[in-house]
Image (cartoon, rainbow, N blue to C red):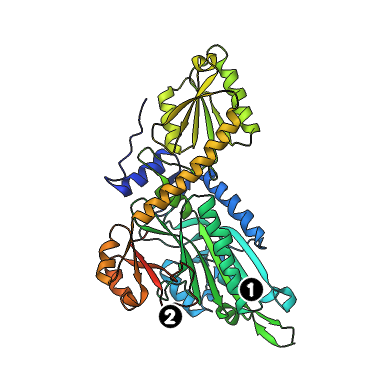
Amino acid sequence: MAKAVLTSKSEDFPKWYQDVVAKAELADNGPVRGTMVIRPYGYAIWERMQAELDRRIKDAGAQNAYFPLFIPESYLKREAEHVEGFSPELAVVTHAGGKQLEEAVVVRPTSETIINSFFSKWVQSHRDLPLLINQWANVVRWELRPRVFLRTTEFLWQEGHTAHATQDDARAYSLRILHEVYEDFAVNVMALPVLVGRKTERERFAGADATYTLEGMMGDGKALQMGTSHELGQNFAKAFDITFQSTSGTSEHAWQTSWGVSTRLVGALIMGHGDDAGLRVPPALAPIQAVVVLVRDEEGAGERAAALAAELRGAGIRVQLDDRVETGFGRRAVEWELKGVPVRIEVGPRDLAAGTVTLVRRDVAAEKATVPLDGLGPRVVDVLADIQAALFQQALDRRESGTVDAATIEEARQAAQAGFARVPWDRIRDAEVDLAADALTVRCLQRADGGIPDSSADPDLTATVAKAY
């Protein structure tokens, strides 16, 4: 059978990543530097991500809305730390309709300012709270070192924005999103273990009081920030005059959160599970969970393959029939390996005559099994569940074996060259700038029990240090 020509992960990880993006037909580079064209299969994966995340977001009580792409420049200047944090990345429009605009407008890098300008109109009383809004949109951040899905000038994402009556309610909601939406999705859909913790003051979101993060270890040992949830305190509420009448009749500023994940998750999927044959997509996420591949259309094999695909679909499996017999079987098999479809079922006249098919698992290299046609639907359902668990365990084993407990900053520096270093925060608290000179960052802070600290000043915290995307 033909083999996909991919650069080996161990030989050149960045080149391997680019090969997978191109040959699995996920995306192309756009005509403007830093933009991307997401191809149908890549977009199908993103749609599955959207659907799973959107359901969880709505279960947490948020409603979807949409806000303008263009934001008056003056809006960003109303929260000083926010605009300072985003200034280098802004795309600013000064001319439109053949004329210079009276006020420049910014192509949204994030929507705190535009959304909060409307929150100030919508929030009047404690009865209007909590106000829980989510937006699915595109944003623009002028990227100097683009890489498809990971860092692009324009990308797709969801951004949640909420207003609450109390600080405790806002903090609880930001953590609810972190755990019940993002962590649950990463672990149970993407099959990727994540470290959940607090960002340092140096790494927190511009304009936030606290930033909580999910950090995944990729196949080369580097960290990827897969999602963040922010406590905004009252910073934006004061800048945009978001006030409400409390139950006692006093005027109070709202407490707020914001949170988001993006198409960067497609990059996490590639780097977290891919191998030298291409993608490996966890069944819970896969737009195609099983592909029925017709080897030769002889002796009624084509009709039987179509009926088999329909049977699997009836068992609740997302299935596709590949009956392109004019294209060589080996080429088609490689295509489905590249795309990471969890299960491939090969159907030929001789198999059918024997009452069997060949079942190929994508998570295990070259593992094929001849299985009976009878009861194939329940068998595939069981195999998909097993693949989901196996991919998570493989990723977890890689992270655990690639994580070193360090006692000093020098030990942390050395360990973080190829993986994660866990080190007491008080040993490196004053060394973040020095670490940055070695392209290392503190990815998150955790308590000794793995929980999220209330403050970076809490005692006995553990810091995870790594190179990152």
Answer with left or right where residue 208 lies relative to residue 436: right
Residue 461 spot, x, y in % from top left? 41, 74
Residue 394 numbered tag: none
Q: Tell which circle, 1 or 2, labels the residue nearer the N-terminal end.
A: 1
Question: What SS does tag 2 mark?
Answer: loop
Say whether residue 138 is visible: no
In this view of the protein, which residue sits in the foreground, 103 or 42? Answer: 42
Separation of disc 1 and disc 2 at Cα? 26 Å
Q: Can you tell which quarter of the image residue 241 is in?
A: bottom right
What kind of residue is marked 2?
A: Ala
State yes or no: discs 1 and 2 in contact (Cβ < 8 Å).
no
In this view of the protein, which residue sits in the foreground, 395 or 115? Answer: 395
Q: For the residues carrying marks 1 and 2, which lies nearer the camera in this image?
A: 2
Residue under the point 71% across and 88% down: 250
Specify the quadrant that holds the N terminus: top left
Residue 163 numbered tag: 1
The 10 Å Cα crowd at callout 2, few under 14, some 14 to 19, many 20 or more, is few
Residue located farthest toward the top when viewing the structure as drawn: 299
- Judge whether 344 appears above or below 404 on screen: above
Residue located farthest toward the front when viewing the structure as drawn: 449
Q: Name the residue under label 2.
A: 457
In this view of the protein, which residue sits in the foreground, 64 or 313? Answer: 313
Answer with left or right where residue 58 lies relative to residue 426: right
Question: What SS does tag 1 mark?
Answer: strand
The 10 Å Cα crowd at callout 1, few under 14, some 14 to 19, many 20 or more, is many
- Judge whether 16 appears above or below 178 on screen: above
Residue 149 spot, x, y in % from top left? 44, 52
Residue 260 spot, x, y in % from top left? 53, 62
What kind of residue is marked 1?
A: Ala
